[in-house]
Amino acid sequence: MDRSTLSTAVSSGHFSPKKAAALLAAVITVTAFCAADAVARSYPFGPRTRSVNDLGNQYVPFHAHLWDLLHGRADGGLFINWQSGFGSSFLPDLGTYLSSPFALLVAVFPRDEIDLAVYVITVLKTASAGAAMAWLLLSLRPGRWWGAGLLGASYALCGWSVAVASYNPMWLDGLVALPLLCLVGEWAQHGRRPLLGVVIVALAWIANFYTAYMATIAAGLVLLLRLWLSGLPTRRRLQAVGRGAVTVLLGVGLAAPLVTVVYFGTKHAHPGRAVQFAPVPTEDLLARLLPTTYSFGSPAVYVGTTALLLALCLPFHRAVPRRVRVGWTLLVAGVALSLQWGPTHLVWHAFATPQGSVYRQAFVLCALLVIAAWQALSYGPPDRRALGAAAGLLVLISAAASRSALVHPVGWAVLLLAVVGALGGLVLLRRAEGPRRTVLAGLAVVLLFGGQFGETAATSAVATRLRLGHMDDYAPWGARQEAQAVAIAQADDWPRYRTDPGREQTVGNDPMLVGGEGAQYYSSLTSDVLSRTLTALGGGWTSRGRSPQSLDNDVTDAIFSIGARVHSPPDPHQNWFAQDGTVPTVSRQDVPPLVTLRPSGASSTGFGPSPYRNQELLLGARVYTVPRSTVRTATGKPPRAGDAAHPGMLVTAPAPGSERKPTITARCPAGSEVYLWAPHFSGTAQLPDGPTGRFRSDARVTKIAAMQRLGRTPASGHLTIELTPDRPGRVPDGAVGCLDTARLHDAVAQLRTTGATHVTVSDSTIRAELPAGSRGIAVVAAPRIAGWRCAAGDAAAVPARQFHGLIAVPLDGTSTTVSCTFHPPGLRLGTTVGAVSLLALILLGALTAVRRRRAAPPQPPAPSTTTTRPREPVTGAL
């Protein structure tokens, strides 16, 4: 539907101006968004993947898990995700990543089109944000409906949206929420739609409470400014503020069952790195107002040249009342400054500087710039004086931004064309009077829409291309994932044993994407106990511990009941020495059940420095030889020793052309399996004629390498491990461990004999039947995350104990069953708050209805339309 068709529909009364503006904004948004991806040759319009960073690593797998839940194919439910992290709390993840109403749309797509489903959801969210903003603009002040549609699309396709939120689709719910919450503020000002306002606040906070928090602050600022401009008596202003505050409190209260669960989930999550906020240089901030600029660490506040020029016109537009000009200009300037000041930065981010992008509130400034632009346009096109002043300010902004490295030469050409279109369109719109009014107005609209479409598509395309060069990226669902999923489905027999998707992962959340039950798990809510336990056992991770990886080790497979393990080639998309077309294989081994027994006197002290000894603590048997090892550099000399902050022996890459490499030598029993533990080493390690062990770590400790299997000890018992570092790294003391597979087999047989005879698992409960007379400690092969309560036999459930990070239940020799139930921390509190809020909302609604009925004037009886003859008096009646 083009603009002329919409104009006809509006003039004929089939569409209200608000509906027409919302539809126009949505159409422009979808068209420009998809056109940009087509220009960038990005999925689904080209060969380039769009799954960069957390989009491919987190959000697509989480949506895949939601698809499985909705179709009854997931291991677990709303409370526990049994597929990830050996059993992780799922409700906080649901509230963080999947609680948007849009997320439910994944159910209508095929499972192997999950990337397309997430893309469609992203486009729909962005279009909805544009439609909501267009509706808000006409609610704030009447004006040209197509102008509101144009500016609504400017907001939806702002720099924050296309550069940051397009691959963090959960944040787009905040983009939708902000104009809706401003509408709630308008209703509070006029005492309208109180119940609908509460529902909108609740939905916004449920969909994504993080960006909803920022949007709520922004809506509050807009409401306060609107009340200051309204000229209402102080009493009525205070009443409006009170209505708005009650609406927010009740709405957030209704969302509390999810919000509190997420809050407590963060309290038990593995801590990320502490980030100190540092404002970006002014030239970088101003550069992000211009088209085609991109940077991960600066505020993306581009809103399009037309919207920017109109916002710059506002202080000089004499047709706009002075208080309106001053108020909106000061609000925009104040929020812009708050982005760069530490204390206000913390307020915007709930008093914690986020990891990654530190300007996640930038969409608030984008919204205020668009609203300011509407204030200028709604009072009529700016005159030459205002346009000249705005053009002068834009020149100054461009001059200052020219000192920034974020502006590329192509950006100046795009900016020039956008300025010509914006200024030309606004000038023609101003002159659209008399007999040529229709022609000039039409030409003005073509220039304005054409300029905005071109620069926005170019900005989005540039951001899409540059992200691929600055961030990790992952291939969409294809032959590799299909082969992994088939292999896992054929081997899976949960809960009799776990099937691990494999050490050679495709993304950090492989179990949710391709199936199985493993250690891999990447979330902002990854539990601290899981990360610490797997690290102590020799596991590797990325994202500073929030993305534990699979550990291909026979002992840990026995501990966690991994009876089948998939072995895939390294992902060719990651360029990890991979070959296309290699079929994954599956290895199997006898493992204990999910619930096993340990003696009452088993050590429950903390882990030690050696992962080999830590594995033995959990297994309950000595199976490793940890020999003294000698490290030598490529020149044959002892390497430099580390210190307390950097323990281990420093190894570096050999000089170019050198045939010798750094080595580790040790002696182990012949025939034992050799493992190397070097979490801060990066490169490869290999025994003669053995497999190549690949280690990935970095100097910033954002990732550490997992323990690797290198083959078997030769008959001589002498080991020489050759190292090929790709950067300086460290080899710790006790790096080599040699596994006696016969002892491990005996230990597993003992655990199978004394362990559970039958195990059943549901959404939030695990129940095991034990042999008669079982004593000691029942250990569940799952991390002891907060929320587990357990009972032996018919005893009352109590908070679960832990055995080196795993769930533990003491036994008395009489109980033959063990049951553990998980209840997400914070759910009871949130449910109570939600129930109180719902009751208050019902009472408030009833009270409002009673007051309206009493205040309504009595209606006069309707005049009769028929004539009736007077009745004769009845006499003699009893």
Image (spheres, grey):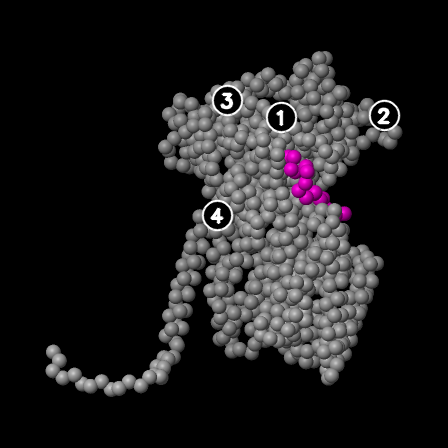
Single out the residue that lies furthest toward the right. 657
Question: Which residue is tagged 1?
Answer: 587
Mark 2 falls on what kind of element?
loop
In terms of sequence position, does the residue under pointer 4 or pointer 2 come before the other?
Answer: 2
In terms of sequence position, does the residue under pointer 3 or pointer 2 come before the other?
Answer: 2
Question: Which residue is tagged 4?
Answer: 826
Q: Are marks 3 and 2 in contact (CB under 8 Å)?
A: no
Q: Quadrant of residue 547?
A: top right
The amino acid beneath tag 2 is Glu
Q: In the shown orientation, is residue 137 left or right of residue 425? A: left
Mark 3 falls on what kind of element?
helix
Inspect this view and state whether residue 284 appears.
Answer: no
Camera-near label (4 vs 3) is 3
Question: Which residue is tagged 2?
Answer: 659
Cα distance between the residues tagged 3 and 2: 49 Å
Cα distance between the residues tagged 4 and 1: 41 Å
